[in-house]
Image: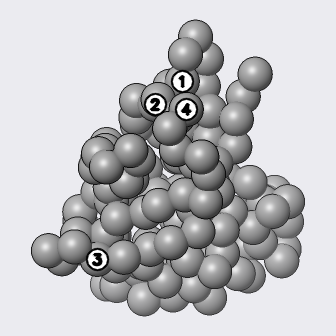
Amino acid sequence: MRNIYKVDNYQYVHNNLHFSLNENQKEIQIQPAGQVLVDSDHFAFIYVVEEGDGYSYIQLPKDGWQHLVKCIQTEQNPYLLINDMNIELINFTEELHQLIFNIEGNENYGRDFVDAVEAAFAEILQENEF
């Protein structure tokens, strides 16, 4: 069964972004899979993790996207804090950066989602126009 874990807290520790979940973390044992997907229905980015014999999702909702902009600008992968362990979300920044440019102007994701991404990541999109 695929689990979806929602990030509900964003904090910076030594200039690195750390996510935490609003879950019973004692039972969560994951490994980064290095892939970022889109959930345009729920206005979220999804980081794929390996869990048991399958994959689960770390959901990053729209209300935290301003933190994702900083990840791209600093070219630093964020960390997920689970069970007092910091797990680097490998390939996160590179994958997200590519996705942002794939989403720009692409109404296959839905006009409202595209508008939200273009607004939230305007700095990133403008920086790369030159």
CA gap, disc 1 to disc 4?
11 Å
Q: What residue type is labelled 1?
A: Glu
Q: What residue type is labelled 4?
A: Glu
| Three-letter code for the amino acid on which mark 2 is drawn | Ile
- Secondary structure state at the residue bearing disc 2: loop
As shown in the figure, which amino acid type bears the numbered disc 3? Tyr
User: What residue do we see at 66% from left, 75% from top?
Assistant: 62
Q: Quadrant of the C terminus?
A: bottom left
Residue matched to label 3: 12
**Picture disc at residue 30:** 2
Q: Name the residue under label 1.
A: 51
Please report whichever mark, 2 or 1, sits nearer to the chain's N-terminal start: 2
From where the camera sits, is residue 104 visible?
no
Secondary element under disc 1, as helix, strand or loop, is: strand
| Residue at the image position 14 percent from the left and 74 percent from the top | 14
Q: Which of marks 1 and 4 is nearer the N terminus?
A: 4
70 or 118: which is nearer to us?
A: 70
- Per the rendering, the mark at residue 27 is 4
Real-space CA distance between mark 2 and mark 4, rounded to the nearest whole angstrom: 10 Å
How far across and down, in percent of the image, does residue 35 sit?
A: 48, 39
**Which one is earlier in the sequence, the residue at label 3 or at label 4?**
3
Q: Distance between the residues labelled 2 and 1?
A: 5 Å
Comparing labels 3 and 4, the label whose residue is closer to the camera: 4
- Circles 2 and 1: CB distance less than 8 Å? yes
Circle 1 crowding by C-alpha within 10 Å: few under 14, some 14–19, many from 20 = some
Q: Indicate whether 102 appears above or below 67.
A: above
- Give whichever of discs 1 and 3 has the lower sequence position: 3
* Left or right side of 28 for 87: left
